[in-house]
Amino acid sequence: MKKLKIAFWVIIIIILFVFGYHNSEFFMTNQSLDLKYGFGEYKTPELPIVVLWIFFLALAAGVWFIYTLPQKLKAKKEIQQMRDAEISHLKEIAALRRRIDAFQSQAAAAEEEKALKAKEAAVAVNDAPVTATVEPTPDSSDADVASTK
């Protein structure tokens, strides 16, 4: 796109030079401007038309610049406000990510602690002393116990 834009402006400039070259006799003739006011009049010295043409082109560009300056300043202010808002949003996102990380690390720590307690309980059950207790069965009688003695 940039190359296309450059090519476009090169073509426009070439057309202007060709136009100026073919009309060089007209542009080089001297002309003066008569300015008549309600209270007087002013006559410029004779200048080549090309000088007058360039002067009025520059004057039009200056008027255009002054006319569009408030819009450009307003747009610049809006862009700065948007950049400030973007920065504040990025800071808020970073703070929220830190909070999420903190919650996730707390949850992971609680889960690890729970797993450790479960492991300790399992080890405590396995390491408990084994005591043999024999409970009498309902089928056994005292006679069976006495005969075994």
Image (cartoon, helix red, strand yellow):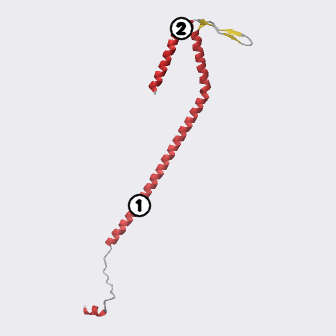
Q: Residue under circle 1?
A: 111
Question: For the C terminus, which image quadrant?
Answer: bottom left
Circle 2 SS class: helix
Residue at 49% over, 46% down:
93
What is the x, y in percent for residue 83? Answer: 53, 38
Residue at 60% over, 18% down:
59
Q: Which mark is residue 145?
A: none
Q: Residue under circle 2?
A: 24
Of the residues shown, which amino acid type is indicated by label 1? Glu
Of the residues shown, which amino acid type is indicated by label 2? Ser
Q: Which residue lies furthest to the right in this view?
A: 39
Compared to residue 8, the image places residue 121 above or below, namely: below
Q: Nearer the viewer, mark 2 or mark 1?
A: 2
Query: Which of pointers 2 and 1 lies earlier in the amino acid sequence?
Result: 2
What is the x, y in percent for residue 70? Answer: 61, 29
Relative horizontal placement of residue 141, taking residue 54 as reference (left or right): left
What is the x, y in percent for residue 80? Answer: 55, 36
Compared to residue 52, the image places residue 143 above or below, namely: below
Residue at 47% over, 49% down:
97
Compared to residue 28, the image places residue 96 above or below, namely: below
Between 45 and 116, the one lying in front of the other is 45
Between 4 and 119, the one lying in front of the other is 4
Relative horizontal placement of residue 127, taking residue 80 as reference (left or right): left
Residue at 60% over, 26% down:
68
